[in-house]
Image (cartoon, coloured by chain):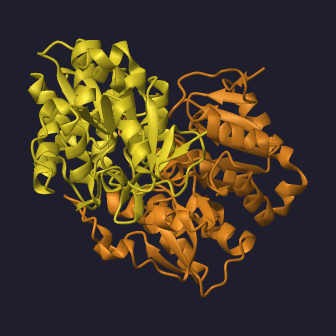
Chain colours: A orange, B yellow
Amino acid sequence: MTIEIATKQQVEDLIAKYDYFLFDCDGVIWLGDHLLPSVPETLALLKKHNKQIIFVTNNSTKSRNDYLTKFEKLGIPGITKDEVFGSSYASAVYVDKILKLPKDKKVWVLGEKGIETELKEFGYTTVGGTDPSLSTTGAFDANDKRLENLDDDVGCVVAGLLFDINYLKLSLTLQYLLKKLPFVATNIDSTFPSKGKLLIGAGSIIESVAFASGRQPDAICGKPNQSMMDSIKAAFPGLAANPSRGLMVGDRLNTDMKFGKDGGLDTLLVLTGIEKKSDGSTTYVTNKLGDLAELL
Amino acid sequence: MTIEIATKQQVEDLIAKYDYFLFDCDGVIWLGDHLLPSVPETLALLKKHNKQIIFVTNNSTKSRNDYLTKFEKLGIPGITKDEVFGSSYASAVYVDKILKLPKDKKVWVLGEKGIETELKEFGYTTVGGTDPSLSTTGAFDANDKRLENLDDDVGCVVAGLLFDINYLKLSLTLQYLLKKLPFVATNIDSTFPSKGKLLIGAGSIIESVAFASGRQPDAICGKPNQSMMDSIKAAFPGLAANPSRGLMVGDRLNTDMKFGKDGGLDTLLVLTGIEKKSDGSTTYVTNKLGDLAELL
């Protein structure tokens, strides 16, 4: 039975019950470039009660540093890098800690700057990605020498959301996938919500090269996949020891809420993003995150 | 038991047994821009025996007229438009004859000129496709007004192979698919063979917008789908009445050979394209189509 947050007492009980507050960002903290109402007050309230705040985002176009800049710009100062878990960071952790890819191997990136930045922080050289020489338009040249001259040092493929997508980048990614290199997906969200529209998501780009190569990603590093939860628990042993002291706050049932539930956390659905009503499967539901501060 | 064509007698028997010779083009007649050996002689031989020749191709980037130009240029003159069945033409036939889309409705095209040309021949206006204003590169503008201002006259989506693919075109296609308009795929080949490489095929582009929209195409107009065979049989009633008088020649087991077999035709696999050996499932196998002329 989902509890609908409506009273001051409920908020006080909720704050007392959890030590770790995990937040999806888009649709919870902000909508695109607009901060949602009473969010800074709610975060300040949790910090005042010495709660650990953790941001968990599937958007791989940004690095953790990019997120800090965004928090600052929207009027939420004081967030630190170790409070932010993005799928680009989680993918870099996977390449380094799980795949143990040697540092002299390169990573082919089908994606944006966020992935490149996080991989570079782990000491990897990336190819593909935002390389301007690959930013082509118009007719495709079947004689393009880059399709012949693959980089033999590439030891892994990381794929995520990519706005500057083109036939050359997709076909080059296919060549590396056909070489049976490890295939890491940042996340598989089928759509990317933007300005009230659903645009092409990372999952729909990855689906294209997956279908072409006849392969599925070896790892998916975004919600609801638990490899990201494992990274978070590794960073916060208290949460690992007692997941029921954690609350996952999100706007999507099939990613955020599933992610929390699968990790043993309680869940709070907010209705400022994708979902417009509760389906009764979460621990709590409230119209917006800011209700917590407003009800107190 | 597959018959391996090796003697003059076998060729004579084969020519006597069939009235309709259906050919896949790439990997059978030509490889990219190179005519395969003894192909003109083989086609001339069949014509001399008053056989009906029919070319069946999944490549939707070309119209039937484009194919006539290509045949001419490669040294195979005298082919007529009614001997060529392409997936772009088959898609236009589907929109007109099966969907019966009114002519004042427009068609949104995710694809190349071939699709636009064939739809225009049926009297339709196309949007999207090769419109140069949609040929963007670099950063994607989330405020792009074209995502808001969809064309309400669009009544159908046709998707196929597209070299000038970008995030805007994919996301615009998604908007029309979310409107539940009929969704026609030219073909679903996962890869596009070019210069000895496997590049991204129509099916892998279509898979991306299908995954994003949570839909599958309502119709697939290329081999091995039988809607193309139905078009061919409608044009050649003799083949419809007696499919066993037809022979489908191709280089791919899962498209060409399946297409022929499902349509009740016998099949001849050639090894100049995708397949490098027989799997015993076709009626005949030979190294190359030109063997027919060379053995006589």
Which quadrant, please, contains the C terminus of chain A?
top right
Vertical position of residue A155 compared to residue B233: above or below: below
Which quadrant, please, contains the N terminus of chain A?
top right
Q: Quadrant of residue A74?
A: bottom left
Q: Position of residue A215 (x, y in %)?
A: 60, 53
Q: Depth check: give the residue in front, B106 or B20.
A: B20
Q: Residue at x 63, y 35 (%)?
A: A254
Q: Position of residue A259 (x, y in %)?
A: 70, 43
Q: Residue at x 68, y 35 (%)?
A: A268
Q: Position of residue B272 (x, y in %)?
A: 40, 57
Task: Count the numbered circles shown.
Answer: 0
Vertical position of residue A122 compared to residue A179: above or below: below
Q: Depth check: give the residue in front, B289 or B184.
A: B289
Vertical position of residue B180 compared to residue B58: above or below: above
- Identify the residue at the far front of this view: B9
Q: Residue at x 58, y 21 (%)?
A: A277
* Image position of B88 (left or right of B202): left
- Identify the residue at the far bottom of this view: A104
Q: Residue at x 64, y 48 (%)?
A: A223
Q: Quadrant of residue A239?
A: bottom right
* Image position of B53 (left or right of B247): left
Does any portion of residue B142 appear in the rendered image?
Answer: no
Q: Depth check: give the residue in front, A107 or A261.
A: A107
Does any portion of residue B66 appear in the rendered image?
Answer: yes
Q: Position of residue B257 (x, y in %)?
A: 47, 38
Q: Quadrant of residue A197?
A: top left
